[in-house]
Each structure stands twice: as C-alpha cells, then as structure tokens.
Image (spheres, rainbow, N blue to C red):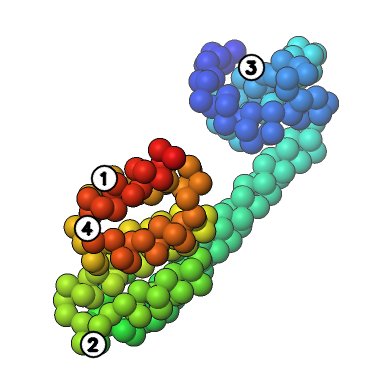
Amino acid sequence: MSKRKTISKKVRFEVFKRDSFTCQYCGAKSPDVILHVDHINPVSKGGDNEIINLVTSCEACNSGKSDRLLNDSTSIEVQRAQLEELNKRREQLEMMLAWRDSLKGLDDETVDAVVERIEGPMAGFTVNEHGKQSVRKWLKRFSVSEILDAADLAGERLDGEPDHDGVNAYFSSIPKICATRRMPESAQRLRYARGILRNRIYVNEKLVLPLMEAAVAAGMDPEDIVEYAKVTPNWTAFRAEMEAQANG
C-alpha cells in the first residue's frame, strides 16, 4: 500500500479555484457543502499528489467513493476539461496583454498630441520628458479638451517672446486652470479677483481667499469683489473692506 502524503493547503486552494469550488462528481458547490480534495487515481493504487490527479469532491461523494477509481472516461473528461480551461485562461491573458499594449500605445499618442498643442505658444521651447510625464498625470485627472482649453487660455497670457521663466509659468498654470474651471462659478470669480490683486498690489496669500469667501458667505456678490480688486489702493484697504462685508 502506498503511503499517503498530506496535500498542502496551497495545493488544496489551487484545486478548489481550478474547479470553481464545485464538486466534480455531483455539482454541489461551496458553501452549501464541505469540499475535499480527492485523488482521481487513489493513493492506494499508486496515485500521487500532482494537481492533475486531484479533483474537488464534496464530503458525501468523497466518502462514498472510497478508493475506487473513477471510470476511464470520467477521468479523461476531467483532465480534458482542466486542460481546456487552462487554455482558455491563457488565451484570455494574451488578449488582455495585447489590449493593455494597445491602450498604452494610444496613451502615448494622446500625450504627444497634447504636448504638440501645448508647445504652440512656447516660441521655440519644447516640453522635455519630465514635462511629458506631467502631461500624462494631467490626463488621468482631466479630459483632453479641458487641458487644451486651459492651454489656450494660459497661452493668451504670454506676452511677446516668452523667456524660460515665462514658459515655465505658462506650463505650470495649465493644470491649475483645469482645476479652477471645475469649481463653481463663484469660486472661479474669487480666484480671478485674487489674480487681479496679485498683479496690482501686495497680497497676503493665506488670508485673501478666506476673506473673500467670508464676504460672499455674508451676501457680497463675487462680481463686486472682482470690481473692487481692480481699484483697491492697497492690501490694507482690501482686507478692511472684506472684513466689513463679512461682519455685516
């Protein structure tokens, strides 16, 4: 009599997965029944623990089978089904890999097309590999049209022949514009007012938005803030006006 070797938990799990946690004799499934790993060719007749010789069996079928061999046709059908399933998995894996490669190629083409548009206003400057990686990250957050619209808007702000600093500012402003344009209209107008203030006077960056938001919460129209940003003489006056509006 052959000495029975314990089937490891890992092998049992692989057999259960392969057989979809279903008894291969009666079709009962876990958790409706307790499953065992059965030997197609019993250990007592020389069967080993190779996975091709193992099959999922419910407790009732396993107990009733004892050490009787499956009939030849059943054994062949079980092994053939296993091989067919493995082949299907291999084919599907190959299709998934091919699909992933095609998507990667499409992503690269998209990045190149967006970069080409972005380089338009850059007057001889080009986007390096680090910049392309940034564009790739943008495309995970924003649509192509959002990025291109933001690039057009940012490009309008470039004056004359841009220098290195101007080009960097243009490039870095694109995702910021995308994010801002997703905000509610009122939030966009407040950031527009902040931009006006930055171009005219000193601005306390930590306070400017909270002050304007508090004024709006108290009932001030964002458009009035935009207009006041155009004429306020200094930061002290602007801050005083926002605080007055917020406090009613």
4 vs 1, front mark: 4
Q: Is residue 179 left or right of residue 17?
A: left
Residue 56 rendering spot, x and y as whole percentages = 69, 26
Residue 238 rendering spot, x and y as whole percentages = 29, 53
Earlier in the chain: of badge 1 and badge 2, it is 2
SS for tag 3?
Answer: helix
Residue at x 22% of width, y 58% of height: 234
The residue tagged 1 is 206
Pointers 4 and 1 in contact (C-beta within 8 Å) = no
SS for tag 2?
Answer: loop
2 vs 3, front mark: 2
SS for tag 4?
Answer: loop
The residue tagged 4 is 234
CA distance for labels 4 and 1: 16 Å
Q: Total marks drawn?
A: 4
Residue at x 48% of width, y 68% of height: 146
> As shown in the figure, which amino acid type bears the numbered disc 3?
Ser
The residue tagged 2 is 160
CA distance for labels 3 and 4: 96 Å
Earlier in the chain: of badge 4 and badge 1, it is 1
Earlier in the chain: of badge 1 and badge 3, it is 3
CA distance for labels 2 and 4: 29 Å
1 vs 3, front mark: 1
